Image: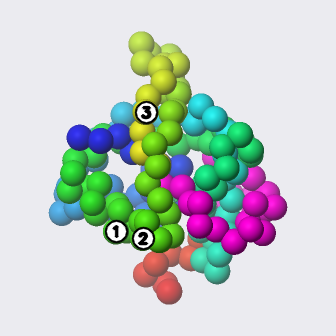
Amino acid sequence: MARVFVYGTLKRGQPNHGVLLDGAHGSAAFQGRARTLEPYPLVIAGEHNTPYLLQLPGRGRRVAGEVYAVDEQMLRFLDGFEDCPDRYQRTPATVVLEGEGAAGGAQVRCFLYSTATFPPEWARLPCHDDYDSQGAHGLRYNPRECR
Ligand code: PCA
């Protein structure tokens, strides 16, 4: 088992969440909502308006997302789905669990899909903290099935 923190299109209610629910890819168990301990730039970039967490810790904002416990099969599936290591790299990060329960405030080590292989101008894009493909930014994600 591994823990993955998702902050973009894989979150609940976002366009690619279904891949976490598909047992044919392995298993993913929701563990809770969380925020990165460190700030990062979360930008929306590229021709398909894709969310990217830039591997520039200390800049940007603390990013909200969800923690999942995934099996080896799902981890390998997600690596392929996220085009890791070319587009994104799966990197370790510390996140802080939200909520009132005993786990609220706990720091957890997770993997997340960030990128260090981005065009330099992306570092000047506006930073988001809680991605929503339908958000007021107006940068609608172009789903893969539409490309
Ligand atoms: N999918 C991954 C990385 C960015 C994206 O859209 C995620 O939701 O965490």
Tag 2–tag 1 contact (CB < 8 Å): yes
**Does label 3 or label 2 sit earlier along the sequence?**
2
Query: 68 above or below 128?
Result: above
Span colored in magenta:
113-140
- Amino acid found under the numbered disc labelled 1: Gly
| Residue 109, image quadrant | top left
Side of 101 relative to 138 (left or right): left
Q: Is residue 136 magenta?
A: yes
Side of 63 relative to 72 (left or right): right
Q: Residue 80 — which label?
A: 1
| Alpha carbon distance from label 2 to label 1 | 5 Å
Side of 41 relative to 96 (left or right): right
Residue located beneath label 2 in the image: 83
| Alpha carbon distance from label 3 to label 1 | 22 Å
Element at badge 1? helix
- Dot 1: few (<14), some (14–19), or many (≥20) neighbours within 10 Å? few
Q: Residue drawn at (42%, 18%), measured in percent from left and top?
A: 103
The answer to whether residue 134 shows anywhere in this view is yes
